[in-house]
Image (cartoon, helix red, strand yellow):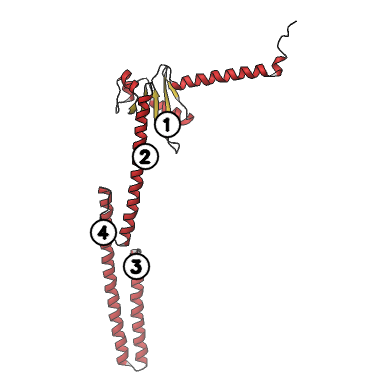
Amino acid sequence: MIIIGKKKLIGAAVFSFLLILATAIWGYKVGMQSALKSDSELVLFFGFIGAGLEFCLLIAMLVYAKRKENDFLMVTKAIQLNGILSDSRAKKLGNLGIVLQEALDDAYQITAQKSLKIAGLNGLIDELLLLIDRPLLVVSLTGEILNCSAKAQTETGCKKGDALAEIAPDISLKEAIQNAALTHTAVQQDTHIVCTPVFSVTGTLSFFLVDLSEQPIVTKVMENVKHLIQKTDTEKKRKNPFFKLFKKTPE
């Protein structure tokens, strides 16, 4: 199948039609000047016949192109509704239908692989939440609880599909989204609740991990890091000869 614009097709056909007529008329005039009246009339006759056939061929091509356009529109609607392309519909489009079907098959395979990967990741998250001994919530940007740990279910009675506002009304999700978008770090709200943002590979904020513990793990880690830094600085000062000058030497 050759795909060509309708205007270009009509333009080429009209040019060919006029060229045949012009050639026939020119041949007729030349023949008349040469006293070849019968031959000139025959050339003009066949010229009109050729132009007529050209016109009929143009009409047939336009009708055929319109049918193929309707077939293509029907195929696209079928794909949109059902997500599949049957062999019978693909054959109506010729080579274009074969190429389109191959592209759809490749897209289906990629989609199936992505679906399996997403299902595997969801299963992994479920298992991790079962192992974590902390009240954790996986919350969407709209405030819907997508998943939760066993301890969160026990302490709050929450379940998938519940609203975060029902479980923790003191959390301002809008404020957490704004702060996370700017800092890309955990946002602490209320006295102990910490919302940890989770970003996609493209850097887009996807959802939050909400820790409802009295001492959230993020806060605990930060305190340990702070203590470790202070301890390291103290040891460096003790080992630095400059600070030894200020030590009081025993008499």
Answer few, some or many: residues within 10 Å of disc 2's Cα (few below 14, many 20 plus, some between 14 and 19): few
Amino acid at pointer 3: Leu
Occupied quadrant, residue 248:
top right
In the rendered image, the residue lying farthest to the bottom is: 35
Sequence-wise, which precedes: disc 1 or disc 2? Answer: 2
Callouts 4 and 1 close, C-beta under 8 Å: no
- Spatial CA distance of label 3 from label 4 is 19 Å
- Spatial CA distance of label 3 from label 2 is 48 Å
Residue that badge 3 annotates? 9
- Spatial CA distance of label 1 from label 2 is 18 Å
Q: How many marks?
A: 4
Amino acid at pointer 1: Val
The residue drawn where x is 48% and y is 29% is 183
- Which tag is nearer the camera, tag 4 or tag 2? 2
Amino acid at pointer 2: Lys
One can see residue 102 in this view:
yes
Residue that badge 4 annotates? 71
Q: What SS does tag 2 mark? A: helix
Image x and y of residue 1, in percent: 33, 64
Residue that badge 2 annotates? 117
Specify the label residue 198 is tagged with.
1
Q: Could you say which is closer to the camera, residue 86 or residue 124?
A: 124
- Spatial CA distance of label 1 from label 3 is 55 Å
Amino acid at pointer 4: Asp
Specify the label residue 72 is tagged with.
none
Sequence-wise, which precedes: disc 4 or disc 2? Answer: 4
Q: What SS does tag 1 mark? A: strand
